[in-house]
Amino acid sequence: MGVPKHLTRALKLLENVTKQNQGLTEAQIMLAKAQWLANDTTNALKQLNDCISKDFSMVEAHILAALINSEQGNTKASQLNLQHAFS
């Protein structure tokens, strides 16, 4: 089963918003969530890592990265994300 049409539209919209406003980390997190839902975990993690590099204190980005890493079996990265989230 492919990606639902409404999720594809949301992805395109969020991609446009984040390209035009690169400082909107909240939009990047929404894009990462949408990419994760569309099974595009590589790009979701890239978005989250970009958010974290801009603002290391973004707990939501660390937690979502931990969740994605955990689902992929990368427990070390997941544990590190959680440690950063709670520090």
Image (cartoon, rainbow, N blue to C red):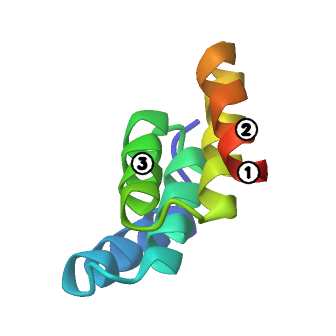
Judge left or right: residue 75 versus residue 38: right
Quick check: 9 above or below 84?
Answer: below
Give x and y (percent) for residue 37: 61, 49
Residue at horizontal 66%, vertical 45%? Answer: 84
Kind of residue at badge 2: Gln
Alpha-carbon neighbours of circle 2 within 10 Å: few (<14), some, or many (≥20)? few
The numbered dot on residue 52 is none
Residue at horizontal 46%, vertical 42%? Answer: 45
The numbered dot on residue 83 is 2
Q: CA distance from mark 3 to mark 1?
A: 17 Å
Give x and y (percent) for residue 49: 42, 48
Quick check: 45 above or below 28?
Answer: above
Alpha-carbon neighbours of circle 1 within 10 Å: few (<14), some, or many (≥20)? few
Q: Nearer the viewer, mark 3 or mark 1?
A: 1
Give x and y (percent) for residue 38: 53, 46
Q: Which residue is mark 1?
A: 87
Q: Do the numbered discs 1 and 2 sit on residues whose CB atoms are within 8 Å? A: yes
**Disc 3 or 1, which lies upstream in sequence?**
3
Alpha-carbon neighbours of circle 3 within 10 Å: few (<14), some, or many (≥20)? some
Of residues 5 and 38, which is closer to you in this image? Answer: 38
Quick check: 66 above or below 86?
Answer: above
Kind of residue at badge 3: Asn
Residue at horizontal 27%, vertical 86%? Answer: 21
Q: Which residue is mark 3?
A: 49
Judge left or right: residue 67 versus residue 51: right
Residue ranking furthest to the left:
20
